[in-house]
Image (cartoon, coloured by chain):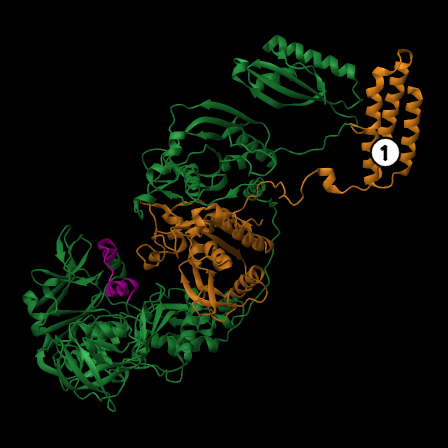
Amino acid sequence: MNYLELIQKTAENARNDLGEIRTPQSAEDFRIKYLGRKGKISDLFEKISAVPKEIKSQFGRELNSLKKELEARYEDIIEKFPKSKSTVLGEDLTLPGLKPNIGSKHIVTQTLNEIKEIFKNFGFITAEGPEVESDYYNFSALNFPEDHPARDMQDTFFVSKDLLLRTHTSPVQIRYMEKHPPPIRIIAPGRVFRNEAVSARSHCIFHQVEGLYVDRKVTFAELKGTLFNFAKLFYGSDVSIRFRPSFFPFTEPSAEMDVSCVLCRGKGCRVCKYSGWLEILGCGMVDPNVFKSVDYDPEEFTGYAFGIGIERIAMLKYGIDDIRILFDNDIRFLKQFTRI
Amino acid sequence: MKISLNWLKNYIDISNLTVEEIEKSLTMSGLEVESIERIGESLQGFIVGEVTSREAHPNADKLSLCEVSNGTEVFQVVCGAPNVAEGQKIVFARVGTIMPETGEKLKKVKIRGVESHGMICSEKELQLGDDHTGIVVLSSDASVGKSLVEHLNLSDTVLELGITPNRPDALSHIGVARELSAILKKKYCLPKIDFDEVDEKIEDLLKVEIENEIDSPRYCAKYVKNVKIKESPQWLKNYLNNIGIRPINNVVDISNFVMMEYGQPLHTFDAKLIEGRKIIIKNASEGERFITLDEKERILTNDTLMICDENRKIAIAGVMGGENSEISESTKDVIIESAYFNPKSIRKTSKRLGLSTESSYRFERGVDFNNTLNAALRAAQLISELADGEIVSGDIDEYPNKLESKEIELRIKRVTNYLGFEISRDKICEILESLGFEVRKQNGGELICTVPSFRPDVEGEADLIEEIARIYGYDNIPLDSRISFNISTERIFTEQEYSLREILTGFGLSEVINNTLLNESDAIFNSKVPMKILNPISQELSHLRTSLIPCLVKNVSSNNKFSEFDLSFYEIGNCVSLLGASLESFNDFVESRNLAICLTGLAKSENWKEKSEKVNLLHLKGLTEALFEKISLDKVSFTSYNNLENIFYSIEIKVFIDATYIGSLYQLDEAYLQKFDIENPVIAAEFNLDLIKSLPKRTETFKSVSNFPKVNRDISFYVADNISFREIEAKIYSLSDKLLINTFPFDLYRDEKLAGKKSIAIRLEFQSYEKTLTTEEIEKKLDKIVKGLEKEFNIQLRSSINES
């Protein structure tokens, strides 16, 4: 058999074998037999030095063309086999995925966002005010008379004779009403300051959401209705609420709202001090004196206001018993709350 | 404030109510019950015992061996108290009794070889007092076997009430009884005041002159002679003990009792120590000094209201008495003071002296000006009963400024409009009258309400409505779930801060929240001047932050301590800096909303496939670019500086939007980080969000996309290291036409061997809107760019131009 016939023969065998390929394994066997490093095609190429000069170039051409043909047909065949993905990637798929870094929003922000969302649905828009406030906005305009014990309810940091760090978000009420005629419906989230020693239960900074609604014929019953619906949306429809009389100089009547304890469902536990209730906010009807300080006519308009302490709500929600951990910013704490 | 139910029972019948019912009634009407203490509960098991025999312990000199009877059995007890004696009635605890001091069960013990089957107790062991020098000896008529709680009538329930500052009327047992009477619709009664007086007249013994009539509108006094100062009877001691007031002697205890009964603070003077038989109420002189009962020297001002005798000051009015006139063991004659002082004046003094007492607490909230004399009479009665005093006839009642009860008009319709439902006029009258208001009906349907003198807080119609709602019961007010809507004429967009947080969280950063208050050195960043707190909690929290960055650095430091090194934080918060030396108004400082970002450690969390590198300024720059792109801010530019002089950072990149400087990126200085024990590089940025919010946003309009493929070409060359990418990029664009749609570096290499040069590889993307670009067209453009770069920057092409 001359060299060219050798190619013919190999080609014939190979084409037959190609026709027999049914499985990936037989395809692989074919590849090793013909196209592998020690396969028949390689064998033939090695023989090229022995091929007589006159047919050498023809031998090379034909062999090359056979190689290309077999490679192409082999590729065609294995293309058609369903592939196990692992063989495609060539990786161990039990390895951990290649994750992007995961960030987190602070739970105070998350809680605030939830509260904002609910009140946004009720038609409240967001307003803001400064943290360094004047005595007027923080106290006087809110019906805290000078030299009145009501001022002791909120231990204050002073930065000058008339400037202080706001002790509540209520000054935003005044600032907003000064600039906008009624009707208004706002919430005002923000940071507030109390001159209190830092402990597990209280901190010198915390955050509040203030709410204010002023219009003709706003009533205490609506205040109850709004806040009850808020509680249901926030805590679930099986929550119960109660209103207790309280005192804030800028509301009259004033109330504190309790929700049935979210942990024991009202049965009584350590968190609710066995009362079955958790205090979550203060509220009331806007005192006519507050309207007078912003030139609203208290005969024409009535309104309600409320203030929610965000840390307290967040701590109850997540079962945190030391407020300081909120501001330690330990990454092992922050990363526990990766929810949007 | 604490209320003893035993004590309360003197004024209102609460026998058919459980403690829980009382708690609920008070809480739901505004006197919040904060806690309930059951007194005597810890003394279960302690009984009256009798020492039937006592002999010396066989093995110890200081111990006694006693036999104690409980009436039915006799126990052998070893006792160490020096005062134990045969025949005494004592407090006995059997083995198994839980000791209140330790909370542990009493065990049978052997003391110096002799068994002891119980304990004879001291005051301290029972937690009835501090005395531990000997055992408690009970009265000889105590009946053996009876429980101690019963014998001493110790069993009581005490409510701790949180009284809001508007309710001085509830700062007493009678006040709480009055409130309960309105809630429960039950009568309450006042103590009967009835006593004999001796012939001597008070006018002959004492004169009272009021110089400051504004701050002291009413001043009453009673005079009681020949009192015997001694211990108070058990019932009085129990009452005071149970509400947390330490009994002292009968006269002092009585004045405390009457204060807690009526809410009227009293003061008692030793009459012998009052010089000139005269009491004068006037202001102190500026800078005068005075020693109060607590033996502290107080510096007075000219607006401090003082009680004086003819020659000296004897008390700070309404706040605290003086050492020079206090009741002592030797006191014989007592002057009882009962006054109404101006709440503002008392509050000012109390605040300035930093001295708050039960007395000042009540005066500054306002006491009942119609009960001033009555309280003095009540005290006189009790002193005569419990201290054998003789009450001098007549009273002093100086009342130069008659205080009038307020009258307020109430419109029934207003009640309905305020509360959102109707309460009948009769019901309204009933509620107000039950609270002590006098109600007169007007023809128009309005009510004229006279406010009782004990309710200084009720000033207007809204206050009356609160009273009505409170007693009607907030829980009985219906829920109205409607809300009237005024459709906003302004469109409300998602707040930018909300988006910023979403984006940064999506980029893998964690939000932190830090305190605004810091120590002075941490409050400073850059050259900003921090605002100082005049009354800080501590030096660690004395200034307001001027920047968010120092706290973020501290967060890195504290996390590093737990081996958390790869951190990426952001914070949004307010910062304040002063503009000049003075701080009087809002013009003297700037408060801004800032966003800060802080990166340290590895840029990406480690995994098994890709190597991560430590963060550098370009990571933060990229993050910044992406952030601004996401919030539609265009025209962002960066200018970098080396700040070798700065202690906080070594490199600063200033960020501008158009021409507005909005913040900087910083490579924080190593020495600065070392102060916080941070070894890794920390990269931080801070932006002014108020400015960012005010900038115009990109308006996004549609641009048609090309229907023809993009062609990429890479060039790779050496160029002098000092030629910036920005220069190269600008040159490339200037050498091309609009078909070059994008260019970016995809490889950068520096090496010592390159001797001041760097190797850079740049991708060029070409695309036409009209046709598929041919290779010839691209090659021509590319050739122009390469030639241009060679000419401008003397680049050396590193490889042939590759197709990719």
Q: In the displayed structure, does residue B335 sit left or right of residue B499?
A: left
Residue at the bottom extreme? B72
Is residue B82 a member of the stretch shown in magenta?
Answer: no
* Residue B527 appears anywhere in the view: no
Q: In the displayed structure, does residue B630 sit left or right of residue A49?
A: left
Q: Which residue is mark 1?
A: A76
Residue at the top extreme? B791
Is residue B351 a member of the stretch shown in magenta?
Answer: yes
Percent x, y of residue B567:
49, 39
* Residue A212 appears anywhere in the view: yes
Q: Quadrant of the N terminus of chain A?
A: top right
Image height check: is B515 above or below B13? Answer: above
| Secondary structure of the residue carrying numbered label 1 | helix
Q: Residues within 10 Å of mark 1 (few under 14, many from 20)?
A: few
Percent x, y of residue B689:
50, 37
Amino acid at dot 1: Asp
Rendered hue of chain A is: orange
Quadrant of residue B333 in the image? bottom left
- State the residue in front, A65 or A313: A65
Chain letter tied to green = B
Magenta segment, which residues? B348-366
- State the residue in front, B210 or A235: A235
Percent x, y of residue A245:
43, 67
Prevalent SS, magenta region: helix
Q: Chain of mark 1?
A: A
Quadrant of residue B77 in the image? bottom left
Percent x, y of residue B471:
44, 73
